[in-house]
Image (spheres, rainbow, N blue to C red):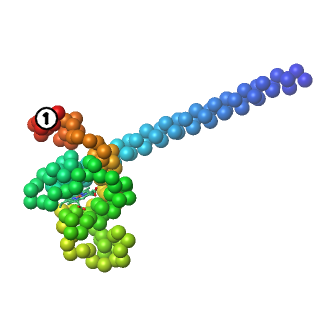
Amino acid sequence: MKSTVKSQPDAQQKVHLSASAVILAFGFIVVTSSCVTRAQNGDEVSAGLWTWKTSGCADCHGPFADGDRDDDDFPIGANVRTTKLDAAALKATIRCGRAGMGMPAFEDGAYAVYSCYGRPLSSAPANLEPSTRKLTADEIDAVIAYLQARVIGRGRITRQECLAYYDDQPDSCEDFR
Ligand code: HEC
């Protein structure tokens, strides 16, 4: 009898302990997975910056995407800093471009293999600006992650943003305070 009475709190304690273990383990999983997601997102943003720099985006949009183009021989790109487009609309614009407006299509097979703007498949419009290179689906997602994390809605271009873009070379950032 004595032992049954004594074993009860023991059993309760065990339940308690294993419950805390579950909570602890769960907390650990939540914390680690959110760190992993953040690290993965950081990687995607850096990959997107690389894509932005190597795909000619800055020729027309300028390095900081405000429409102050890098090269006068190119069409003037939109100010992407103030865009109201959501991820899906950004993706459609980058995949398919804007025929007759100067924005190239960056997806290989856009219009012909993959539908654009809900149109039936056909050859790409003739008045589409040519792109310097094509981007994979991952590169398009990465450049969108970059624009959303560092560019869209950021307001004026700061010296800090400029230094981050130009790998801490102050000579490239004299115009920014
Ligand atoms: C040859 C010039 C050119 C290049 C290169 C270019 N763009 Fe554009 N882009 C434009 C022009 C011009 C517009 C505005 C089109 C219009 O008026 O509808 C535009 C529009 C956009 C828009 C839509 C903005 C809005 O609010 O409607 C996004 C997003 C965009 N470009 C992203 C990119 C990205 C990312 C790259 C590189 C992968 C890129 N562009 C390369 C010229 C260019």
Q: Quadrant of the N terminus?
A: top right
Helix, strand or loop for disc 1:
helix
Q: Nearer the viewer, residue 26 or 64?
A: 64
Residue 96 drawn above or below residue 141: below
x and y, in percent, of residue 82 in the image: 28, 49
Please rate how many residues cluster around mark 1, counting C-alpha atoms within 10 Å: few if below 14, some from 14 to 19, many from 20. some
- Residue 164 quadrant: top left
In the image, ligand 1 is in what quadrant?
Answer: bottom left
- Residue 77: tell me if it is visible: yes
What residue sits 30% from the left and 71% below the top?
109
x and y, in percent, of residue 16 in the image: 69, 29
Tell me: 117 left or right of 21.
left
What residue sits 18% from the left and 48% below the top?
63
Q: Nearer the viewer, residue 6 or 176?
A: 176
Which residue is labeled 1 in the image? 170
Q: Nearer the viewer, residue 72 or 138?
A: 72
Amino acid at circle 1 = Pro
x and y, in percent, of residue 45 in the image: 32, 46
Residue 10 drawn above or below residue 104: above
What residue sits 81% from the left and 26% below the top?
8
Tell me: 111 left or right of 170.
right
Q: Nearer the viewer, residue 70 or 27?
A: 70
> Count of labels shown?
1
Q: Quadrant of the C terminus?
A: top left
- Residue 36 quadrant: top left
x and y, in percent, of residue 111 in the image: 31, 73
